[in-house]
Image (tube, rainbow, N blue to C red):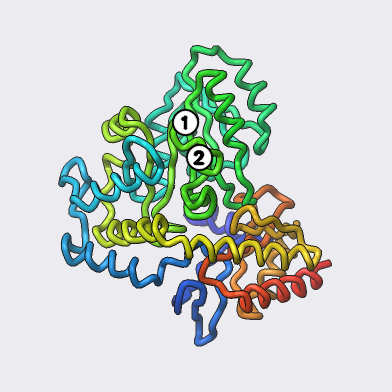
Amino acid sequence: MYEFFKEQLDAKEQNHNLRTLKEYCPIDAVRVKRDDKEYLMMASNNYLGLTFDSRVIEGALKGAQQYGTGSGGSRLVSGTFPLFTDLENELAKFKNTEKALVFNTGYMANVGTISAIADKHTIIFSDALNHASIIDGCRLSRGAVKAYSHCDVDELKYLLKQVDRNARKLIVTDGVFSMDGDIAPLDKLYELSRDYNALLMVDDAHATGTIGNGHGTAAYFNLEKEIDIQLGTLSKSLGSVGGYIAANSTIIDYLVNTSRSFIFSTALSPADIGAALAALHILETDASVLGRLQENVNYMADKLTSMGIDATNETPIFPILIGSNEDTLAVSDYLYESGIIGTAIRPPTVPIGESRIRLTVTAAHNKEQIDYVCHTLHKAMQTVK
């Protein structure tokens, strides 16, 4: 009865592509412990290091103390806490839009939004390296999906020219691509969206708190009021959990009435919302947090480059391309034995032959830690050459 599944797992193991869960106990924003050994975390999306910030923890505690530990139901059935309204108002101001709507995760925000605003009569133009949640949202919409090569504006223009100008169209892209760390050419995508009468949606999961003075990709390109739909997460830079959509009131009201992942999900807990509110306030008022992140990004990029390892200082994501699954696992294991968590990223997350170590630096790392990671990585890469 289970032979098929066992065969599939065995094949993954033979291809050095089997995933397993490892249990870690966090010590602080950048250190974890396992079996009494301490590790430096270099695979986290906690970009601003806020998960252990006392102000964020206090926000979570206040939320739970005031409204309890659970929400008690979906928001259309059980109602919306004032805390939700406060957060959505703050997110709308933060993204310079009319309204915002909170979802349980960024994944659910993408799936629920795309499948709601697009249908079988919609043509969706999606970057080939978009996140899995965008891809799944496109599939659920039943729209006609046309993938264009990564950040290839010319190819996108060619595809747009082939369809009826009056057809319903959606262009969707990551803002910062999670596995490559590069930034979408949102300014050029915006021009095409206007030229060809298409909605434009950007996923700012990895852009919020990292570019555009922390406000994301639209702010990075000075297009905050122009982009039709901006998605973000309350996890990653904001140190909580959840996702959100920021857009005009028509889009948000439409999602409230049609987005299945919003309508049929029990709402986030008050602690989650309280933590996100506190983190958002820090991001907007405490410039030192963003300053530390950019300083660390610059420092790590310079360090890696000086060692002959390709790196840029665009974002906190450093993709270290290795190639084969086996070699990538060897580098990851070397780092692990040296007390560093640098996860091996393999297919299907990335294309075959492009397995990599995806390192991320945060505002909470210090220069000594970054030095140690860079030197250890350099040694590890020598072992597979």
Query: Residue 223 vs residue 270: left or right?
Result: right
Q: Are marks 2 and 1 in contact (CB under 8 Å)?
A: yes
Query: Residue 61 vs residue 384: left or right?
Result: left
Which quadrant of the figure contains the C terminus?
bottom right
Residue type indicated by callout 2? Ala
Q: Can you identify the residue that label 2 sits on?
A: 218
Q: Position of residue 258 (x, y in %)?
A: 30, 31
Quadrant of the rendered image containing residue 318: bottom right
Q: Nearer the viewer, residue 80 or 83?
A: 83
Q: Dot 2, how many residues are within 10 Å of its Cα: few (below 14), some (14-19), or many (20+)?
A: many
Q: Residue placed farthest to the bottom in the image?
A: 36
Residue type indicated by callout 1? Glu
Q: Nearer the viewer, residue 122 or 41?
A: 41
Residue 320 in view in this figure: yes
Q: Nearer the viewer, residue 145 or 296?
A: 296
For residue 209, above or below residue 359:
above
Q: Nearer the viewer, residue 287 or 275?
A: 287
Residue at x-position 54% and y-position 85%: 37
Closer to the N terminus: mark 2 or mark 1?
2
Q: Dot 1, how many residues are within 10 Å of its Cα: few (below 14), some (14-19), or many (20+)?
A: some
Residue at x-position 34% and y-position 42%: 92
Residue at x-position 71% and y-position 76%: 376
Quadrant of the rendered image containing residue 373: bottom right
Q: Can you identify the residue that label 1 sits on?
A: 226
Q: Secondary structure at mark 2?
A: helix
Q: Position of residue 220 (x, y in %)?
A: 54, 44
